[in-house]
Image (cartoon, rainbow, N blue to C red):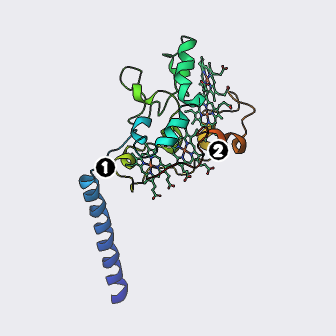
Amino acid sequence: MMKKCSLVILLMAAGTFVFFGSVRMGHTQTDKEGYAGAEKCAMCHGDLVKSWKTTRHAKALASLKKKSQDTLPACVKCHVTGFEKDGGFVDQELTPELAGVQCEACHGPAAGHASNPMNKKNLIANPGEATCRACHTVGQDPKFDYSVKKKLVHGENQKGDKQ
Ligand code: HEC
Ligand code: HEC
Ligand code: HEC
Ligand code: HEC
């Protein structure tokens, strides 16, 4: 009986520690949150950014401009980075750095990682088919084949450079 009691107390104490511990972490957390924009990735992933710029993703908002539909939210949402997400694309005046389908549209908001490379908290290292399907819906892109198309996302540079 005694043993069971002290176990409960021990568990409660541990719970309290974890609770307050994580609150404290939240307060002392200095890493940035949200989206950084591809130019911020270029410092360390220079070759990847350069070759991504040759892809249609990089020009996705430009192709809406050509049709004069670059301010229509119903179109913009799939042609930019982080539309209607915390710290994501708002409009071309406020967030020009998030135009087009950038790194973070697939890898998740990476401002934290860009300011501290060892921070991979929100980073999606290997974006799966579901990530693409948010935009390459069956209606929008009926012939989308993940295994083929994923080889094209970085342009010619597929290995990447990290330093
Ligand atoms: C200050 C340098 C630096 C910046 C800026 C930076 N990265 Fe990185 N990134 C790294 C390093 C170093 C690694 C390798 C870390 C490792 O292997 O532990 C990495 C790894 C990655 C990976 C692979 C993660 C994995 O687990 O394999 C992705 C994806 C990535 N970065 C995306 C981005 C994106 C997107 C941006 C811009 C928003 C960015 N990085 C900005 C240094 C940086
Ligand atoms: C935020 C929306 C969005 C996400 C997420 C997204 N795409 Fe795209 N993708 C687009 C848009 C928009 C275009 C067309 C850009 C243009 O031409 O203006 C496109 C074009 C492409 C193209 C070039 C056209 C083609 O069909 O060959 C490839 C390849 C591609 N996407 C692959 C992928 C893959 C693979 C993923 C997931 C790993 C992915 N995309 C995730 C929106 C997205
Ligand atoms: C659900 C996400 C989504 C929405 C919403 C969306 N697009 Fe796209 N768009 C894509 C994807 C994915 C591609 C690339 C695959 C393809 O070519 O269909 C693309 C490609 C394009 C292209 C380049 C390909 C071409 O046909 O020349 C244009 C232009 C375009 N979209 C315009 C628009 C306009 C205008 C709207 C609003 C009426 C819109 N899109 C809404 C996802 C979307
Ligand atoms: C359309 C989605 C998409 C975009 C845009 C995109 N990536 Fe990726 N990225 C992927 C996928 C999918 C993989 C996993 C590829 C694989 O395993 O074959 C990947 C892998 C990576 C890796 C790990 C590669 C390695 O060799 O370890 C890094 C680093 C990376 N991406 C950085 C970036 C950066 C930086 C950008 C912007 C310049 C970017 N990605 C743009 C989908 C994307």
Image coords of residue 113 (percent x, y): 39, 49
- What residue is rendered at 70% in x and 32% in y? 138
- What residue is rendered at 46% in x and 42% in y? 46
Asked if disc 2 is less than 8 Å from ligand 2, the answer is yes
Q: Decide: is 23 above or below 9.
A: above
Q: Which quadrant holds residue 132?
A: top right
Indicate left or right for 139 with 68 as reference: right
Name the secondary structure under disc 1: loop
Name the secondary structure under disc 2: helix
Q: Which quadrant holds residue 24?
A: bottom left
Which residue type carries mark 1?
Asp
- Which of the two labelled residues, at mark 2 and mark 1, occupies the earlier sequence position? 1
Indicate left or right for 152 with 31 as reference: right
Residue at far bottom of view: 2
Q: CA distance from mark 2 to mark 1?
A: 29 Å
Visible residue check, residue 25:
yes
Q: Which residue is mark 1?
A: 31
Visible residue check, residue 74:
no
